[in-house]
Each structure stands twice: as structure tokens, then as C-alpha cells.
Amino acid sequence: MNDLNHLTAAEAARRIAAREISSEELVAACLERIRQRDGEVQAWVHCDPEGALAQARASDKAKAEGALAGVPVGFKDVIDTADMPTQYNSPIYRGHRPRTDAACVAMVRRAGGIVLGKTVTTEFASRTPGPARNPHNLAHSPGGSSSGSAAAVADFMTPLAFGTQTGGSTIRPAAYCGIAGYKPSYGTINRAGLKQLAESLDTIGVMARTVEDCALLVNAVSARPMPDLSTRLAQPPRIGLCRTSRWKEASPAAQSALENAATALARHDALIREFDLPPDFDRLYDEQMLIMNFEAARALAPERFTHPELLSDYLRNKLEEHWTMPPEPYRTAMRHARECRQAFTGMFADIDVLLTLSAPGEAPEGISSTGSSLFNRNWTLLGVPCVTIPAGRGPKELPLGVQFVGCYDDDERVLRCAEWARSALE
């Protein structure tokens, strides 16, 4: 029973439903792992063991039903919880207690899930990091801004956790920590109760140790159906190998991981073909940053005007810079993004998914940087579904990942192809 925290969410849900284990036993195993390890990993900003156990006991007593019945879930601390502090990693909100749950929290509860605690985030899900560390090597970052969620899942403290992605904050930390990450199509998970950073980009994503678990969690809190991941694809997928125009900025290890994955999938009869985005798509990398910063300057205006001294120097300066930026570059970037979204859909006539980099390489050393979002920004701005899976290790023995990208609202295909690839790469 001591290894119950190693169960996947799907297996745990099945065993709880069959009364082979209890939710209380599962939650207790996760809490014991947190007790043993979180002093070093520092993935959690708030965890209430007695509260979590009380939820679990109530679930067991009621023989709760639902997709997540009895399964613990972690929430990035930019997502409101009524029974726990929500502080956004900012002294402005120290001890802040929202009156209501965010929509995704309420839906997890409705699906029978146990709210285990709040995971460390960067300041307002921006750049300035929190204390979380990579469980594979504590001297390295777990990535950001969903730092604690990735670290907690990777270290077997919880089978499921929510993150967010405005640049690369779900896919990149999942890759750095060697787990699965899923950024659904923009708008899939309702954002009510999420502390907004950039309204046209913010996407609630999920992290787990399997693709199936990622799909399960999104299914439980959205209208998106649960894909059948147990049935083999009718034929191996048609995969576009997309190195992108920023290929030279990836490490040799990341480049090798992508090439090796493509070669391995071809051996399993996937049809691999070279895929190049149109030249003007290169503008998306810089336009994502411009749009994010322009919108953040407005979303965080109350904090900047009321408590500027409590913001990090980086964030305060960035907000001030983009508050005074003329609006026309922002409008031009938004128009170009809309044009690219329309064009992107038409590029999948002969392929099912793209195979591309999840991150520039292994997790950076130290925790002053959460790493670069370069290989995520364009996909986030396009609003399309992305799934990262582990793809070996780099020269420092830290995890690497590759990601699968598809058309907007074609999440089921992306998930099924990612699961097929995960099985083929084992």
C-alpha cells in the first residue's frame, strides 16, 4: 500500500470504484510523499493534510461517483480556491482567500476529485520564479510558470495537477520534469476564477504521468469527450516533422531527441514527412511576447497602480514599458495571428499531427530562470492543442520531451497520436 501514490489517476479511479483501495489510503500515500520530499522539492505553497483526508473520507463514505472519484488533484496557485489561500506568488495577496472556487476547481469537486493543495507558480504566472525545484536534480529548475505542478506530479506527490499556459508554461515544465503535459485548444477549460495575465492567450492546461490521465482530467472539467486511447489507431499516423525556423536555438540534445523520435516512429510505420511553416509564421514568436506583455499591462493594472513596490523589479518595469506602448503594433500582431490561425488549419490535408520540440533542451541549472518558452509561443498564439511526452534524457541526465501539435479543436486526434507515439517509443 506504500506505493499507492505511484498509481496513475485512471488506475486509481478504477481501483477506488472497485473498492480495492480507498480514497483515504491514496490521499494518505500522496501526503506522506509530500511530507518526505517537499522540504527539498518545494512544489507546494499550501497543503492541508487534514482537509484533504476529510474530503477523502467523505468520498469513501458516500461511495462517490464521477470520473475523478477519490483521486487527488493539485492546482497552480493562480487558480482560486474557496477553502485555501490563493496568493499568485505575490506579497500583494498574502493570505488572500477567494469567496468562491474557480470553475475548474468546482468541476473537479463535482467529478469527485480531492483538492489536495496549491502548487507553486511564478509571480502572477509571469517570469519571476518561486522556490520549486526539479525533482530529478534539485539544482535545476522545474520550468515555469507551472513550476510546482510539474514537480509535484513528477515526484509522485499527486497523479494530477493543473497548470496554465500563456507562453509555454504547461508544455515546457512537463518536458523538463519528464511527464506528460497537455495544453488543450484555447478555451477548452473555463477560465472563471483564473488570475488573468493575457486574455487572448491564457489557457488552463494539465499535467500527469500519462497521456490518458491528462485526457481524463480535461474530460472531467470540460465538454471535450474522453478519447478512446485503448484502441489501436486504424493506421499509423501521418506525422509532419516540424523543426521550425528557430531550430538552431535548440540544444544538440533536444535536436537529437526530436530526430531520434522521428526515426523510431518511422520504424513503427508512421509516415514521417518534412514540414515547414510559411516564412511569415516566424513573426509569431515575437508577436506572442508583444501581445502577452501588452495585455498583461492592462490585466495587472490594479496591482501596478496600487502596490507597485510589492511587484518584482522585472514585472513592474515590463508593465510600465507596455502600458505606454502604442496600440497599433498590438492590433497588427493580433490581425496577423488571426490570419495564421486560418492558414494553419489548411495545412493538415496530408498529415495528422506535427512532431516538434517541447523545449530548447534540458532544464536550466539554478532556479533564477524557468527556461525559455521559445518552442511553445507560436503554438500558444495559434491556440492549438499540444501534448508533450518524455523522449529520453540529455547530457546532464535530465528529461527531454517532444510535443505533438494539431489543428484547433482536433484535440482527440492529437491525444491519440501522442499516446500511440508514447507506446512506440517505450
Image (cartoon, helix red, strand yellow):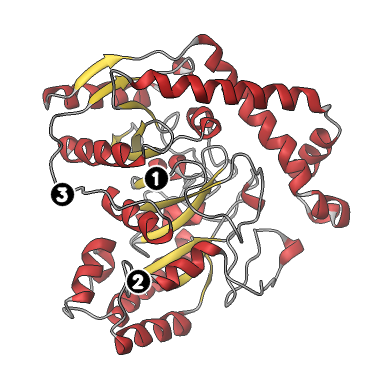
1 or 2: tag closer to the N-terminus = 2
**Which corner quadrant holds the N terminus?**
bottom left
**Which residue is painted at 40% across and 83% down in the image?**
53
Q: Amino acid at mark 1?
A: Tyr
Depth check, mark 3 against mark 1: the one in front is 3
Q: Is residue 317 left or right of residue 149?
A: right
Q: Dot 3: what SS?
A: loop
Identify the disc placed on residue 182.
1
- Crowding around mark 1 (Cα neighbors within 10 Å: few <14, some 14 to 19, many 20+) is many
Write down the residue under mark 3: 230
Q: CA distance from mark 3 to mark 1?
A: 18 Å
Q: Dot 2: what SS?
A: helix
Task: Decide which of 317, 217 is in the foreground and name it.
Answer: 217
**Which residue is painted at 31% across and 82% down in the image?**
24
- Crowding around mark 2 (Cα neighbors within 10 Å: few <14, some 14 to 19, many 20+) is many
Tell me which corner region of the image, top left, top right, bottom left or bottom right, holds residue 360. top left
Residue sitting at the far bottom: 61
Q: Are marks 1 and 2 in contact (CB under 8 Å)?
A: no
Q: Amino acid at mark 2?
A: Cys
Q: Amino acid at mark 3?
A: Ser
Q: Residue 390, can we see it?
A: no
Q: Dot 1: what SS?
A: strand
**Which residue is painted at 36% across and 82% down in the image?**
56
Task: Decide which of 6, 14 is in the foreground and name it.
Answer: 14
3 or 1: tag closer to the N-terminus = 1
Q: Is residue 7 left or right of residue 388?
A: left
Write down the residue under mark 2: 30
Residue 217 drawn above or below residue 72: above
Q: CA distance from mark 1 to mark 2?
A: 22 Å
Residue sitting at the far top: 279
Depth check, mark 3 against mark 2: the one in front is 3
